[in-house]
Structures are given as C-alpha cells and as structure tokens.
Amino acid sequence: MSSATEVFQPLQADDPPVVAGYRLAARLGAGGMGRVYLSHTQGGRPVAIKVVRPELADDPDFRRRFRREVEAARRVRGAYTAELIDADADGVPPWLATLYVPGPSLTEAVAQSGPLPVPAVLWLMAGVAEALQAIHGADIVHRDLKPSNVLLAADGPRVIDFGISLAADLSSHTAAGSTVGTPHFMAPEQASGGEVTAATDVFALGQTAAFAALGRPLYGEGSAPGVLYRIVHDEPDLSALPEQLRPLFARCLAAAPEERATPAQIIEWCRLRLGADADTGAGPAVWRDVMGRQATVPSPVPDPTRVLHTRPLVVTRPQPWPAQPEERRARRRRAALITTAAVAAGALVLTGFAWLVADAGNRFRDWVGDTPSASGTEDSARSSGSKPNGSSPESAPTSEGGAATPGTGDRRPGASKVAPTASVSPQVLTHAPALLTAETSLSFKEPLWREDRKGDIRLDCKDVGCAIESDSSVFVQMFGSTGTTLDECRLLLGGADRKRWTLASVAAGSEICVKHSSGDIALLVVQTKSTALPELAALSVDMTVWKKAAQGDSDNP
C-alpha cells in the first residue's frame, strides 16, 4: 500500500472512541460481521478490534454461537494465523481482538500489482495450508476462506476470521437474505447446502490461490446464483493457470471432498517445487516484491488529559500481563494511604458529631433555665447592639418564618435562625416509557413524546446500523454503573459535540445524557432496543428533562 490514508481511515462520528478499554486509533474497514478498528495493547503492540454489527448483536442465537466459536478460536496457535488475543461475546456490542498484521490483503495486493508469480503462489499455498492445519487441529472449519481473509505480512501469509463466520452464517439476519460466505470462493457442497468439512476449506484454498495466479476469480464474474451454479455443475477451467501449478489445483478443486488433497500434502507438494528456496527461507524476499511499500502504523492513542467520565469504564484498559513487583508495592502504598485517610476522616466526623450534641444540650439548658425578664433581655440586647443570639434586631425571624418584633426577647429554639439562601432546583419533566420509532420523536418541551418527527430527538436507521440523532442537541453515553445524576450529565456534556449517537453500544439499562441548545439537559434510560430489522426498529426509553440545567443552579428560574 502506498500511504497510510489508503489503509487507516479516520474515525467517524458514529465510531466509538474506546472498546472495552482499547482506545481506537483508526478504522481498518468493514465486513459482513461488523467494523474493524486499529488499536494497541498496553505494551503498544497493534491489534485489530472487530465490533459486531447491531443487527447480529441483537440476536441471542448469534451471541451463543459467537461465544462458542470465540472459545474455539482461542485454541488456534499457528505461524500463519492472526492469533485471537481477546474477546467478549457478552459485550455491548460483542467484539474480538486479533494481532494486527501489517500488510495488505491478497485482494489488495493483486489489485495493486497484478497476478502473483509462480514462486509467490507456491509460498502462498504452503503458508495457508499450514494455517489450515492449525485451524482444523482445533476442530474448526474456516467456512469463509477467500483473498480478503488472507493478509500478506513480510514473512508470509496470515489467515484471519477462522471459525467466527460460523456464528454469523447461521444467524437469523443471514437467513433473512445475507450470507457471510463469498459465492466466488465456496465449495460445491457449501453452495448446495451440504455438509461443510475441512475439505471445504481446501477447495476454497484452491480458488484463493487461483485468484492470486490469475488476478480474477476462477469461476468468473457475474451474479451470485450464476457463479454458484458453475461451481456446483461445471469442471473448473485450469487452462489459464501456469502449467506447473495445474496438477495441484486439480487436486484441491476436485468435486468430491474425499478426493481433494490434504493440507499436509499441499505443503509437501509446494516444498518439492520450491526446491532449495524452501530450505533456505527465501520466502521473505518474495513477499517484499509482492507487498511493495507499506504504510506506517499509527501510534497508540494517548489517554485523554482531561477526565470526561465521572465513573470508570467497565474495563479501563486491557491487562494482558500480571502486575510487576514494583506496581504491586505501589498499590499497597496507595491502599495504606487511603486507609489512613479514611480513619482520620472518620475521627473528625465523630468529633464534630460529639461537639454538635454538646452544643445542642447547652442551648437547650440555656433556654429552659433562662429567668431574666423580657425588658432585661431587651436592655442587654440594646446595649450590645444585637439580639441575644447575634442576629439583627430588625430582622430576626420567628420559628414560623415571620420577623420577630423588636424588643420581645424571643428566645425560642430557632426563633432567630436565618435560613440560608437555597439554590432553586431546575424544573423537572418526565415521561416513562417513550417509544422512538421511524414515525415518532422526543421533545424537550411538553408533550415530551410526539407522534411525528418534529421533536428534538429522532431514531434513524437509514444508514448502516441505527442511531439517535438531533439537529439541536448533543449526546454522550454513560458507561459503567447506572443511576446517572444531573451533575454527572453536566460534567460529561461539557465537551460533547456529537449530534448522532449510534446504538451499537446501547442495550437495555444504558443511559444517555442529552443537552439541548436552550440549556435543557435530559437523561434517556433505555428499556428495550429492537434494531434487528431496521424497517421495524424501535427504542423504548424513560426520559427525564431538567429545564435550563446546563447553565448552573444560579441561572435556573
């Protein structure tokens, strides 16, 4: 690839800045299961974060299959696979992280440089076959091996997305009309709905390698049904392939699965044709010629200098390694300091409470046992220029809130207390629940729920994935525990500027703060979310509005 801009795309408004503690540096692309982002481990190693699409995440059956396939993929350890290092099938949304491979996909390499030379095709087939050995050894069938799932690193190919496609391939979303597998690279039994086995991946390897040698799909272009028909019913035309490669391709592309070569046989066949180069490790030189100049991987995104959240995320940053001795000692010192501070604070609280009790007792005894006449008290007050309790003689309030008559010497408890000026709480409006659909909206003015699209907050599912949007308000989602307060919303909304918030990370119980241009602040608490079918999408929320709350208590009416 020629430049970083061709590989690493900037994050868009609907991209999350953080996924489970991984700070996202760039967008790498999108596929049938979701979007892929560049991030880094705590030690700075690049990783690829794949975030599952909301339509799939809403499907309980998908989550169950995804969890099973992730656990299986964790067992795969191979020199030619992109290792799965982290995942959360129960996340909102589900996600997984693999080691980032700094190189183009086979699709991109062929588009840039044309068909690969014969030695490169041999190295490619041997490397991918070795990857299949590791994958099949973990009882996984890839099911979606194709050029875009083969990345070219400086030391050989890397196979990605192994096993994970099974979860999506059986989802209700897929059944509704979208397949994860690519028709041009399916095996006959896969295209006809038969049993999928390890031999299915071998057929896909033959098609993938043929694409590398020809620069186009072996079974031609055209509509998916037409391509699948040719795969099931026609013999592959190998005449355009290099003659020395045809015997191997014929074995890989046999119609009957049991007649296909095994990954071990493919590796041995390729090594014999590579000869001395296979023993001297000449592969990297071949890949340098194929890959060309590589883009520079963006640096890790630093932690923000200003705290934007009032509570920590569920996982603040990935922790793949145990704490070192120095870090453990530092934690123990911090814990000791916190404990000491807590004990000291408790002692101060108890001392203050004891003083208040003693002072209250003294005041009560003075009130009960006070015998001087009112006139005597009045004379004493006049000589000192104030009431006995220190308040102004003209404005000492009674316990009922009225002003005491000067000279009465009123000594009742609370008679001369002046109530401090209290801040006026903002007016609060609530609506629970309110249903957002393609035909309704929410407003900051009563009625909060509207049966039209003229409100301030609307649900939009026209683009990929659903989102809430507004022309006059900004959004920010709270992560962590529930029970967001007005002050927390104020703080978090201080630097908010997004007028569209994707629902990919939103689930039942999620809380979203909203600030209107008028200064009103709202808290949306999600009750239910249904976005599997965008045309029928709905979001049920409880809405609380604090009027003019963004300007601070002193400005509230």
Image (cartoon, helix red, strand yellow):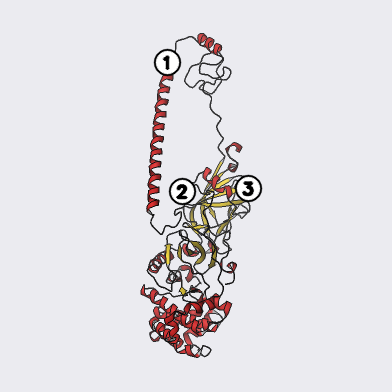
Q: Position of residue 96 (x, y in %)?
A: 45, 64
Disc 3: which residue: 517
Q: Nearer the viewer, residue 442 or 138?
A: 138
* Residue 163, image quadrant: bottom left
Say which label, 1 or 3, has the lower sequence index: 1
Instruction: Tell whether 397 sits left or right of 166.
Output: right
Does residue 286 sit above or below 6 in this rendering? Answer: below
User: Dot 2 surroundings within 10 Å: few (below 14), some, or many (20 or more)?
Assistant: few
Q: How many marks?
A: 3
Mark 1 vs 3: CB contact within 8 A? no
Which amino acid type is marked by label 1? Val
For the N terminus, the quadrant is bottom right
Q: Position of residue 166 (x, y in %)?
A: 43, 71
Does residue 171 sit above or below 329 in this rendering? Answer: below
Does residue 406 sit above or below 6 in this rendering? Answer: above
Which label number is shown at residue 482?
2
Disc 1: which residue: 368
Which amino acid type is marked by label 2? Thr
Measured Cα–Cα span from mark 3 to mark 2: 25 Å
Q: Position of residue 471 (x, y in %)?
A: 63, 54
